[in-house]
């Protein structure tokens, strides 16, 4: 049990690092960011914080909204928020990923970005420790509005893109590529990894709370039985 949990946590963190690396490739491609990263960059530029910190703040806000909407969250959701933003800042500060100075190099970097995002998502989602905050909000809004997932997710992306653009986030051909092509890359990578996201059974924080409560109740009952046997 412990060994399996440690394995999942290592896989989760590694997957999130790969996702963060993919995001930085997209940023340094200098052709425009994915919709949510446009928002993160816009907040970063407008408020004067790092783009990773902006990502963490938006993630926390979305998770709080998900809880209010009645959605369960997992430990992986919390780790997702904290790790991706932190990893992004560390990768950018280390200058591990070079900046592109041409359209051709930029497009190549975006392709690398989308590929890394696909493998990173496959690694962390396969752990079954909870989905990302935006996926959770998508599900919550779909339940509340009874609208198709495509409309709900599309509205979320357009909303993030619009606010990010108004705040000074960079929009360009890379934004269009990410918006229309990233999903196909993720689908291909999931097939390569033989991962069916619809069949993943996530373990939520509420499940662990119930488990701990059940152990506590069981322990109290066993203690009561021992005390009864002693008194007899």
Image (tube, helix red, strand yellow):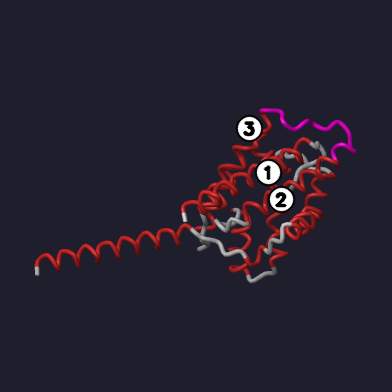
Between marks 3 and 2 in the image, the one whose residue lies nearer the viewer? 2
Q: Disc 3 versus disc 1: distance between alpha carbons?
A: 13 Å
Query: Residue 45 location in percent, x, y?
Result: 67, 34
Query: CB under 8 Å between callouts 1 and 2?
Result: yes
Looking at this view, name the residue that lies furthest to the top: 94
Earlier-in-chain disc, 1 versus 2: 1
* Residue in front for this viewpoint, 126 or 108: 126
Report the span colored magenta.
94-107
The residue singled out by tag 1 in the image is 18
Residue at x-position 60% and y-position 69%? 143
Regarding mark 2 in the picture, which secondary structure is present there?
Answer: helix
Indicate left or right for 231 with 59 as reference. left
The residue singled out by tag 2 in the image is 119
Task: Tell me the quarter of the image containing the C terminus.
Answer: bottom left
Regarding mark 3 in the picture, which secondary structure is present there?
Answer: helix
Indicate left or right for 68 with 171 as reference. left
* Magenta-span inclusion, residue 102: yes
Regarding mark 1 in the picture, which secondary structure is present there?
Answer: helix
Neighbour tally class for label 1: few under 14, some 14-19, many 20 plus, Cα within 10 Å: many
- Residue 97 visible, this angle: yes
Query: Residue 126 location in percent, x, y?
Result: 62, 57
The residue singled out by tag 3 in the image is 90
Neighbour tally class for label 2: few under 14, some 14-19, many 20 plus, Cα within 10 Å: many
* Magenta-span inclusion, residue 106: yes
- Dividing the picture into quarters, in which one does residue 190 lie? bottom right
Earlier-in-chain disc, 3 versus 2: 3
Q: Disc 3 versus disc 2: distance between alpha carbons?
A: 20 Å
Indicate left or right for 217 with 187 as reference. left
Residue at x-position 31% and y-position 60%? 216
* Residue in front for this viewpoint, 211 or 156: 211
- Dividing the picture into quarters, in which one does residue 222 lie? bottom left
Between marks 3 and 1 in the image, the one whose residue lies nearer the viewer? 1
């Amino acid at each position: 049990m412990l060994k399996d949990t440690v394995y999942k946590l290592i896989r989760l963190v590694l997957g999130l690092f790969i996702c963060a690396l993919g995001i930085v490739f997209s940023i340094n491609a200098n052709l425009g960011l994915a919709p949510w990263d446009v928002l993160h960059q816009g907040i970063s530029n407008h408020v004067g914080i790092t783009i990773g910190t902006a990502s963490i703040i938006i993630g926390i806000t979305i998770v709080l909204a998900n809880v209010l909407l009645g959605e369960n969250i997992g430990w992986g959701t919390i780790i997702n928020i904290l790790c991706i933003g932190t990893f992004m800042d560390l990768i950018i500060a280390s200058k591990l990923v070079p900046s592109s100075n041409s359209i051709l190099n930029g497009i190549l970097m975006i392709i690398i970005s989308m590929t890394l995002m696909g493998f990173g998502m496959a690694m962390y989602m396969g752990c079954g420790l909870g989905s990302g905050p935006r996926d959770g909000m998508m599900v919550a809004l779909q339940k509340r509005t009874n609208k198709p997932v495509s409309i709900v997710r599309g509205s979320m992306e357009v909303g993030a893109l619009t606010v990010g653009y108004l705040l000074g986030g960079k929009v360009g051909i890379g934004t269009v590529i990410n918006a229309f092509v990233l999903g196909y890359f993720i689908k291909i990578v999931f097939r390569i990894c033989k991962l069916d996201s619809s069949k993943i059974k996530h373990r939520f924080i509420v499940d662990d709370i119930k488990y701990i409560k059940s152990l506590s109740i069981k322990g109290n009952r066993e203690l009561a039985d021992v005390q009864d046997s002693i008194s007899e």
